[in-house]
Amino acid sequence: MRKPAFNFMESQKSIEKRGKKRVRKGQPAGPWVTARKAVQYSTLIIFIVLFIWSQRDGWPGNVVDIPMRLDPLLMLGHLLASRTLLAGSALALITLLLSLVFGRAWCGWICPLGTTLDLFPLRGKHNQRGEPAEGWRSVKYTLLMTILVAALFGNLTLLFFDPLTIWFRTMTVSIWPAADQVITAVESFLYQSPFLAGPVSTLDGWLRPVLLPVSPAYYRDTLLFAGIFLGVIALNLFATRFWCRYLCPLGGLLGLLSKVALFKRQVDEECKGCVLCADVCPTGTIDAANGYRSDPGECTLCMDCVETCPRGLDAFKPAVSLAEWKEYDPGRREALVAIGAAAAAIALFRSGLFARRESPFLLRPPGARENNPDVVAYTKCIRCSECMRACPTHAIQPAVFEAGVEGFGSPVLNMRLGFCDYSCNACSQICPVQAIPLMDLAKKRVQVIGRAYIDQNRCIPWSDHRPCVVCLEMCPLPKKAVVVEETQVSSPDGGIVTLQMPHVVRDLCIGCGICEYQCPVSGEAAIRVFSPQTLGQS
């Protein structure tokens, strides 16, 4: 005869003791939790693979863009800001449908940032002392509404806080370049051994350019963006999944949909209040004062409560109903705060310095200047950083100061760190929302990014009277935008020499920046690319 799952004659006290012992040991790891972790780690690997192959010559943009297109907050924000409905945005309906059926399963099973937070809990699930008040949960809803209201005004700055953009941007700007530096250092050390030189060369040939760049990637303010990511993880010290509970705007959007989800957590009336489910809940949403029920808008379907309950009284069952509205759920006050905050921010942005006259170094990717109604706010950009990852020369960098607060995190070109490759149109192919318009190589080659200008006080021939024509040699245009004029000048030793003095034909220059990148002058280049608006040219 098959032995029952548990002895119904044992005392309630012994059941609680057994359950607490399982919690202390980090159990259970039953089928539901095992399935959830398997899905989490599998999807995290998929996200990493798509990230790796989002580089130039990788997989097609419509494949590596799938994670961004699945994010309903990004797609909805772009729709409101650009007034454009993209066909690829329909993928976000999959996530919305998932939430209407299973609640915030995306947050607990799929989101790469959520999985990362689970990998670094920093605080035990059963330690709920000193956690923030329940009212803090309203912050994510206020942030969500502020994002959507600002999007109506054509501003997507706050999408910087979307969990997918945080994860992808950190991978692009901080984690992957740092991993490349570590691997390079280890390879250099091992290569010094005659016995390991051959295998190390073979390994490096396999890694590059498939997984790692041929030349090191350098990004500005890597510590800033890494610090933001580490800060999100560090919040786990105050509460498990602090970000998901209190701050995540995407979690807020999915949480509202989860109020009417088909499957909800239900607790049998025989529950004796052993508190084990509340102890292990990573979002702290199980309410002992309400019969140990939970808010489906806060539940991430981690299934820990189901497998911790010693009597099997926790279950997720279909129920067509609207969940109870909580005090922290959005109401009139939060809506007014969001509208006021968004309107005030937009007004301040539009009365700021860059609204009057943009930075002379605000260089956007090819075609982006013409394709975005507001080049400073970068109206259509969702701050996903995919163009930065795809750029083979790493010229595309996250904006910090060039576009003020309004353009923070949007893509700008820094020609001293890279240049716009004349034979590349990868950024236009990978942009998931066409903030960088899709264009073939021929069209891209005539897009004006900026105009080069020679500082004669720093240029070697002009200031030092020594020969240098690197800018002329590097110019990729069929009809060179840099020309030279032979001039007789005094040499450093007092003689007379004939030098080729470079000049820029600005009507021909497209601002690709290779001249600035290759300029041999230390520090700031003697030839720099300026915004075409700054120079009064279009």
Image: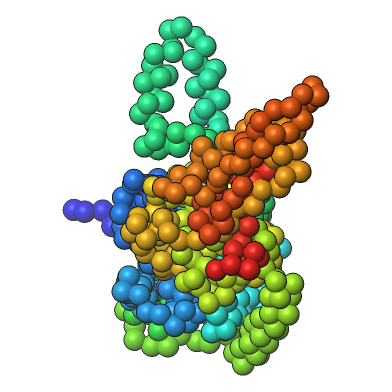
Q: Is residue 109 above or below residue 357?
A: above
- The residue sitting at the left extreme is 1
Residue 330, visible in the rendered structure:
yes
Pick the residue in front: 469 or 120. Answer: 469
Q: Residue furthest bottom?
A: 332
Instruction: Name the residue rendered at 32%, 70% in the picture.
Output: 88
Q: How is the image coloured?
A: rainbow
Q: In the rendering, at what x and y percent does residue 522 appear?
A: 70, 35
Residue placed furthest toward the right:
494
Q: How many marks?
A: 0
Q: Find residue 333 and report its image quarter.
A: bottom right
Q: Residue at x 63, y 87 (%)?
A: 339
x, y (%) of residue 179? 52, 36
Q: Quadrant of residue 212?
A: top left
Can residue 296 be seen at all in this image of the molecule?
Answer: no
Q: In the rendering, at what x and y percent does residue 501 appear?
A: 64, 40
Q: At 53% across and 23% down in the image, what residue appears? A: 186
Task: Give 139 or 268, whichever is nearer the viewer.
Answer: 139
Name the quadrant of the C terminus: bottom right
Residue occupying image coordinates x 73% and y 80%: 351
Q: x and y percent of residue 19 in the render?
A: 48, 56
Between 518 and 4, the one nearer to me in the picture: 518
Is residue 433 depicted above or below 153 in this figure? above
Q: Between residue 446 and residue 344, name the one nearer to us.
A: 446
